[in-house]
Structures are given as structure tokens and as C-alpha cells.
Image (cartoon, rainbow, N blue to C red):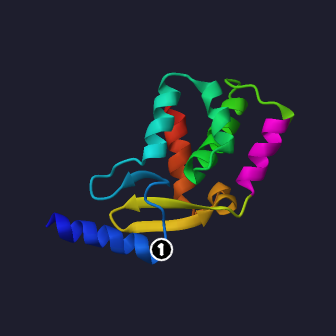
Amino acid sequence: MMTFVLSCMYSSYAQKDVDPKDMIGFGCYSGGMITKSVYDFTSLLEKSKYQNFLKFLDSKSKSEKFLAAVVCKKLNKDRKLKLSAIEIKKIDTILNSDELVSICSGCTYFSKISFKELSKKNKENFMLDKIEDWLAKY
């Protein structure tokens, strides 16, 4: 049974060319797990280590870079993190980028989406709603 599940997961990754090690997700796979980047960022948020998010703006990990931009922007808005003009410009550049990031939801939904599309508020973009709900908890 496990072999079947793993082969299905691999098949999903291969079809969408997603990166399972660098992904944003809040309820992935049959267990509804969060991804590593979401887990790591949640830990930082719980510990109020807000300054640490700034270093992820230059991360090679696409999921970390995108989440850092969203988190820093929200923390700045909530006056929990003071951003410089350079950092604000960097965040805007990231959020308007055509760079692709892998996302997942549930057992079968794996895809890639541009930072720009993932940042847009619209009814098709369920992932941005999940990110905003996640941030609201912390």
C-alpha cells in the first residue's frame, strides 16, 4: 500500500514538475501536513523572532523567499518589524516576480505558480487565503 501511495505522489510531482523539498502548503498529502518552510516559519513566528525573516528575503529557497516577503510585509503593517526603504523595495520586487514556487493542497493538488500570481487577491487563489489565515494566528 505504501509503495502505491509513494508512486502516486511521485507521479503527481513529475506531472507538474513541482519541487517537493521547496514547497508552500498548509494541508498537504493524505495527512494534511504543513510543508517544511511553513513549519520553520511558524516556529519563528511563535518565538517572535521577527528580525530573522529579513535574511530569508535573499534565500535560494523559493518557498522561503516568498513566505519571508509576505511575513515581513504583514509584520511591517502591524508595526512589529520596521523595514528600510531598501527592504520594502526588495519585498515588492519579490511579490511582483514571475519566479515560480511549488504549492500543494490535499492528496492530489500539486502545482507551480508565480510569486506575482500567488500575491494577487482573487477567488481562484485559495493559497493566499490560507497564508493570510496562517498569519492571522500569529
Residue 14 point in image, percent of width and height: 42, 74
- Which span of residues is magenta-colored? 86-96
Q: Secondary structure at mark 1?
A: helix
In this view, the residue in front, 11 or 130, is: 11
- Amino acid type assigned to the residue bearing label 1 in the image: Lys
Residue 40 point in image, percent of width and height: 47, 37
Vertical comparison of 136 with 116: above or below: above
Q: Local crowd at mark 1 within 10 Å, few (<14), some, or many (≥20)?
A: few
| Residue at far bottom of view | 15
Mark 1 sits on what residue? Answer: 16
Q: What residue appears at the point 43 percent right and 45 percent down from the top-left corner?
A: 36
Q: Quadrant of the N terminus?
A: bottom left
| Left or right of 113, for residue 97 | right
Q: Quadrant of residue 70?
A: top right
Q: Is residue 110 magenta?
A: no
| Residue at far front of view | 60
Vertical comparison of 52 with 91: above or below: above
